[in-house]
Image (tube, rainbow, N blue to C red):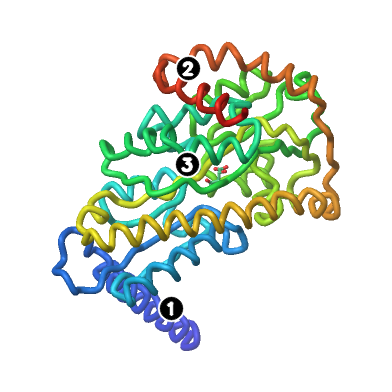
Amino acid sequence: MKRLFTVALTAMLILVLAACGGNESEGKSSNGDGSESGEEKVIRAGIGLNDKHPQYKGLLKFKEIVEEKTDGSIKVETFHSGQLGDDRTMIENLQINSQQVVIPSTAPMANFVPEFSVFDIPFLFPSEDVADQVLDGETGQKILDKLEGQDLKGLAYWENGFRDLTNSERAVSSVEDFKGLKIRTMENDLHLDAFKALGANPTPMAFTELFTAMQQGTVDGQENPYATIYLQKFYEVQDHVSNTHHIYSPFVFLMSKTFFDNLSEENQKIVKEAAEEAGEYERKLNREANEKYLKKLQEEGMEFTEITDEAREEMKKKVQPVVDEYKSKIGEDIVDEVYKAVEEASK
Ligand code: TK8
């Protein structure tokens, strides 16, 4: 009994101490709204993927550059694995400046700025190189500018990459094989409708819930780049992988607009350039990762199914009515502009 009491008391003490620690760090970082110049600023930066993923390595690079160039007057605290929430929650955190940086996939961003859904068009980008040119060019910038109306500042495009399908039911090689598969999609209407059009039974879900959902069989499968499938250990709960490459998923390096606007011009330049430079580094690591991890997935026991060009064409045809339907929701002008930019960059 006495022992039990000691244990309970210790647990309570730990809780109290943890709560104090939490408050202190929150107080330190709520400095984005006009703290005096010279005072130290803290960027709380969170991502959804784990610390093995190039997304985190890129974030550490951002931290290194910013802390060095500002002589430590801006500190970057990094959080991975959805420790600060899923993509959508973290974007909302930025809007109230309780968090300063997040690097989400573009798909959930479409809930804030509909134009971002242009990147949800399946089979839009034929290659990473074309994606780079469009995203880093005028068209990509125009779409980033739309974020300002949502109190968000888009500093650079990073890369999630081409998405591939995994599931625990069967090898998928053609449209027919999608039939009835319970697929988790990102929280995005176009993705949901596209998977319905392919005959699947899709459910939108935050990334933070996904592993457990696959483990418990709430969903049969999901789609993400090889780097995520491998580094998040999805192979432990998934048996089949197909190189559907059905969509290229960009990340956006987002900052709280309130925080950004309160930085000196010099520091604005530093964070912008750091986001770009760290993004180049992240893209490079990510491409190396996606290159090598398909083999690793097979070594871990996943069965790989090749999707032929014909099968991919068939998928493209099936989802075309969905794309047509969404064109006006996204904005006809922006859709046409992106198609044109893709064509130009593909030359
Ligand atoms: C990580 C997400 C994730 C995305 C998804 O926060 O939700 O499937 O691909 O990697 O952005």
Task: Give the residue displayed 20% in from the left and 57% down from the top.
Answer: 262
Q: CA distance from mark 2 to mark 1?
A: 53 Å
Q: Earlier in the sequence, mark 3 or mark 2?
A: 3
Q: Picture coordinates of residue 122 (x, y %)? A: 60, 26
Q: Which residue is identified by label 3?
A: 136
Q: Picture coordinates of residue 37 (x, y %)? A: 16, 69
Task: Give the residue displayed 14% in from the left and 69% down from the top.
Answer: 36
Q: Picture coordinates of residue 135 (x, y %)? A: 49, 38
Amino acid residing under circle 3: Asp
Amino acid residing under circle 1: Ala
Compare residues 322 and 60 and report the one nearer the observer. 60
Q: Which residue is identified by label 1?
A: 11
> Horizontally, is 258 left or right of 220 in the view?
left
Q: Earlier in the sequence, mark 3 or mark 1?
A: 1
Dot 1: what SS? helix
Pointer 3 with pointer 2, Cβ within 8 A: no
